Amino acid sequence: MDTAEKNEYAAAKDVTTPPVPASSHTAVTQLRQMLAALARSMWQQARDREREGWPPWWLTLVAALVVAAVLGLLVVPLLRTLLRWAGARAADLAGWGHEYTYARIVLDPVRNYLTSHATGLPVDGTTLWWTWCLAGATLLVLSLFRSVGARIGWALYGASSAAMVAIGTVGPGRWIAAGICCLWWSLLSIPALSRRRARPLGVPAPGPAAAPVPQATTVPAPREPGNSRSAPDEEDEHPDDDAAWAAGLYEVLVRRERLAPPAPQRWSATTHGSNGFTATCDDGRRAAGIAVSGEAVRELLAGLSAPPGARPEVTWTTAPPAVPRNRRMHYDDLQEPAPIRQFVIDSTDTLTHLAGVLRERREQWPVDRVQLQEKIIAQAAALNRSYPLVAGASYIPESVGLHDDFGMIALHDWVATDTIVGGNASSWNDFAGHRPNQVPLIIGKLLVAPDPARALAEILTDDGHVHLTRHFGPAGPIHVVTINGTHRTHALRLLGVPMVAAEVTVEPLPLRLAVFSASATDGWGRGRHHGPTAKLWRALIDRGLLTGLIIGTGFQAVLELHDVAAPWLISSPRDAAAISAAYDRLHPGALGIPAEAMSGPEQWCQWLLGTPWPTP
């Protein structure tokens, strides 16, 4: 091939296979990045249930489409098949009943017996027959509702029916007919004479107390701050990671203990299973929970000390809980406090005091239904102006690691109703259509009951009980309603009853916080803090409200938390400002934070950082 032919071939090659512009690769890369960012934003929106406007419209649409697909492709065909099968079986059953009239073996002899023995009575045999049928149906229905008299009558009804069948049947089939009558009566007696089995309450009594086992803790070399642990699926292959985690946990808890003063209270603790425990204080309080180690139990009990955070003395009647394998606690060992009913009944002095308060309220509140509803609305409006509830706030951020949670603790206690600042309602007496008449019923019962103390005990213990989470501040605790008790706490607060009995859970401070564990996302896919979390932590440390170690910078920053004046201060600015404002209404000036800083997230960041909270 000469030079001219080579040039011609090269030109043809350039025309037929043009090079791909670099801009097309850039466009594809940008599209992938945009799709990945969109997916991350949608995932954060779906996970953040506390933000306003949740769920987003697209999540509702996707859920509706999924439900429609499941109904159309699975449920509807399944129901159609079941209905066809049930129709065929019903036809077979009707044919069986028509062919084998076992019911007449019992009914005909009874009817013949009543008809033949009605002579001399003021009613005929037909009336006796229908009276007998009606009596049987009535006894059966009342027996289902566990009426003792009806159950006795049902037993006599079955015996007399079997006797009439035996007498009214002629021939060798007499006893077979009586046996079939007993069979029918036994089958009907299964639901009629059944009894409800209640789950036993309370904490199992511990066995014979063993000699106290000294806490000899062997601590491996502590891990370097900021070192990451292995992934959960690699933990079985790297047992040394568990030792490093235990050493780091022990190091943090001991450091917290050195910073805290000793508590005057003493606790006697007993282990249940591997990680469950119960503890009894020398002042009579009884707590229960789950923990990974003896040091962790002492950390949890410090939340129940006076002052809060002070480390109490703990004496073990058994060996303390052991650090679980792979840092996973056995939640089957989770203990609960003793039954709250007994706790309330034993609080005679408190019930007597509250009964006196209720008698005073009877002079101030109407009992007429219309007037009572108007009084409740007016009282709720006054509370919403003076002590509004905090809605959708995070009081304690989640810890960094999946297994950094070292336990939980709960006890039964009388709680001041004015310290309940949040829960499952956005405002007082607003339940979004969920049993809105419950509050008037509770208040009405307390106003008219002959024994107000007994009525209050029934309200606090029937149909479950109140569950609260306690968060400590410098001047005292505040509480949040969790899984149960919203209507009762609202009713008592509106009525002016100063205390409520509840199962109180005390959440421990997290061990470590990262940027994304210390905040949530808003509707714009950004963190609520809208700024470097490390700067917020540093500002709290500089103001003496936080003690801890900040490791790393920027989005890699991690806070190893030692102590904080109030746990909600390390939440997002929106939550920190709202909760601090609620706390300041109860304890003015206790936090030492200007009122302007607690008026909103922008003002909070302006106070801490000198820069406002960014807006979309």
Image (cartoon, rainbow, N blue to C red):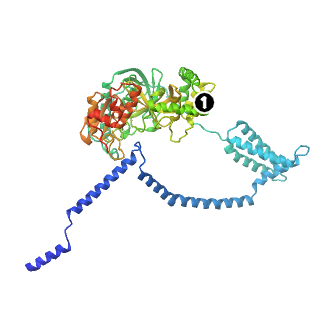
Quadrant in the picture for residue 453? top right
Residue 172 appears left or right of 322: right
Residue 169 appears left or right of 388: right
- Foreground: 258 or 250? 258
Q: Residue at x 26, y 29 (%)?
A: 542
In the image, residue 100 sits, relative to residue 486, either above or below, namely: below
User: Can residue 220 be seen here?
Assistant: no
Image spot of residue 359 (x, y percent): 58, 22
Image spot of residue 129 (x, y percent): 82, 48
- Amino acid of disc 1: Lys
Q: Which residue is mark 1?
A: 445
Quarter of the image with the N terminus is bottom left
Q: How many marks?
A: 1
Image spot of residue 484 (x, y percent): 50, 36
Residue 82 appears left or right of 96: left
Q: Residue at x 69, y 58 (%)?
A: 93
In the image, residue 440 sits, relative to residue 231, either above or below, namely: above
User: Can residue 39 be seen here?
Assistant: yes
- Foreground: 55 or 347? 55
Q: Residues within 10 Å of mark 1 (few under 14, many from 20)?
A: some
Quarter of the image with the C terminus is top left
- Foreground: 317 or 505? 505
Image spot of residue 443 (x, y percent): 57, 30
Residue extending farthest right? 120
